[in-house]
Image (cartoon, coloured by chain):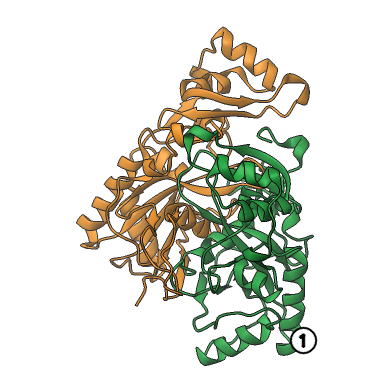
Chain colours: A green, B orange
Amino acid sequence: MSSSINSVSIIPVIGIPEIQPGDNLVSVVIEATRKNNISIISGDIIVFAQKIVSKSEGRIVKLSDVSPSSFAISLGKTLHKDPRIMEVILGETKRIVKMDREESCKGRFIVETHIGVICANAGIDASNVSGGDTITLLPVDPDTSARKLVEGFKKELGVEVAVVITDTVGRPWRQGLTEIAIGCWGMKPLKDYKGKKDSKGYELRATVLAIADEIAGAAGLVMGKTDSIPVAIVRGYRYEPGGKGARELIRNPEEDLFR
Amino acid sequence: MSSSINSVSIIPVIGIPEIQPGDNLVSVVIEATRKNNISIISGDIIVFAQKIVSKSEGRIVKLSDVSPSSFAISLGKTLHKDPRIMEVILGETKRIVKMDREESCKGRFIVETHIGVICANAGIDASNVSGGDTITLLPVDPDTSARKLVEGFKKELGVEVAVVITDTVGRPWRQGLTEIAIGCWGMKPLKDYKGKKDSKGYELRATVLAIADEIAGAAGLVMGKTDSIPVAIVRGYRYEPGGKGARELIRNPEEDLFR
């Protein structure tokens, strides 16, 4: 039978405390799931919101420590942003993809980060960090972050799980933000139907699905913005183990009509 | 408590037969769920793959009936597509957003459809239709299709459900296709956190989530391409009733940096 005829459950992990730099997220998740009588089992996909991974890895910048460059000051004026935040965003930026013109006052600033993710403000989030003087950056290498978490669950519980690290991003053409996978380990992020046959026996043309992004979106349904639920478990989806991480989800620039 | 602390289940509806023009999808789904011992309950979101909605509405074109225009013949040469399919695609197109140049031989043709969805080939799918001489078009008005399905479940079962109609589309910058909502009724497709407070009491900046697209992506996990599972039930997500349909998910052109 096929891999997709089971029901899939999306289970919020409630009771994750405020994360501090150096915290062991594997221990934190194990403790929270035990309190909720959830057993993590092999085959689970454990989904982490980027922010707690970033915090645990110390990817936090104190704004009062930042000296903005003249370019950051100029851009900050154009985009109506704090020049220190602008400076931090530029530090995470490989390429500016698109920005609003001054008169629109929207302040949108879409960039490619050093790992190749295209998103607003290099994924830098000024909300929800203690104090108000600090901002969180994306993890330096979210696939490696995901791999370490996979290894941690294996070591602590003896289970083979996959891990997806999500960020909330906007999209061209469509209203509203969705979750995408910026880090992934233990499962192939893409599912390729090339050569497989449809229900009528016709061979499918190359159809590659971004499974890890759909996992991220599904987890987003229980990881509300106001609920302090930064972890969810997706259970029952029979993923293909392996893969090279969420970097596979970044379209080859030569094949991208919209770079 | 918040709306998002429950587990969410994604239940595939197995055993949907091949759909013919005029088929009543509500009856078909009720019959299949009964055979699977699933009761549809108020609050469920019933997700339909576009193709069976299109088939039930007779949105099928016989290629042998199509006379391509000279522009369709020319474009077909450029994009390496059957000029009759090209003709049908152009009939569904309001605006050509981007197309490959001849030398790339990729044949990609990204358009805005009459209802404002931006996707390749106006969402026309030449696979998986009986015979091989026929192709399916997107529903003319998927929000109205969704509304009629919502009303049908109310009439037949007395339940208040939401309906999402999905299509599989590519995206700029990211590898792999994902499901999006092209039709939606009974639930608000967007969730606006404006004015709400995060877990630390800070007011969130305007953060609007594309819930219906995340529902579509979640359902995509059980609606495989090869499995004849064109319907799934998303259960346990407490959506907000109302809304104006999936048309709310189409970004206002004046606010789109990437039109």
**Percent coordinates x, y for residue A101 in the rendering:** 55, 33
What subunit carries mark 1? A
Q: Amino acid at mark 1?
A: Lys
**Percent coordinates x, y for residue A176 in the rendering:** 46, 49
Residue B126 vertical placement versus B211 (above, below): above
Left or right, B229 with respect to B155, comes to right
Residue A54 vs residue A219, the one in the foreground: A54
Residue A152 vertical placement versus B227 (above, below): below
Which element carries disc 1, helix, strand or loop? helix
Task: Give me the residue at 75% from left, 25% from top.
Answer: B105
Residue A143 vs residue A23, the one in the foreground: A23
- Residue A115 visible to the viewer: yes
- Residue A49 visible to the viewer: no
Extreme residue in the top direction: B70
Question: Count of labels shown?
Answer: 1
Task: Give me the residue at 49% from left, 58% from top.
Answer: B219
Residue A107 vertical placement versus B43 (above, below): above
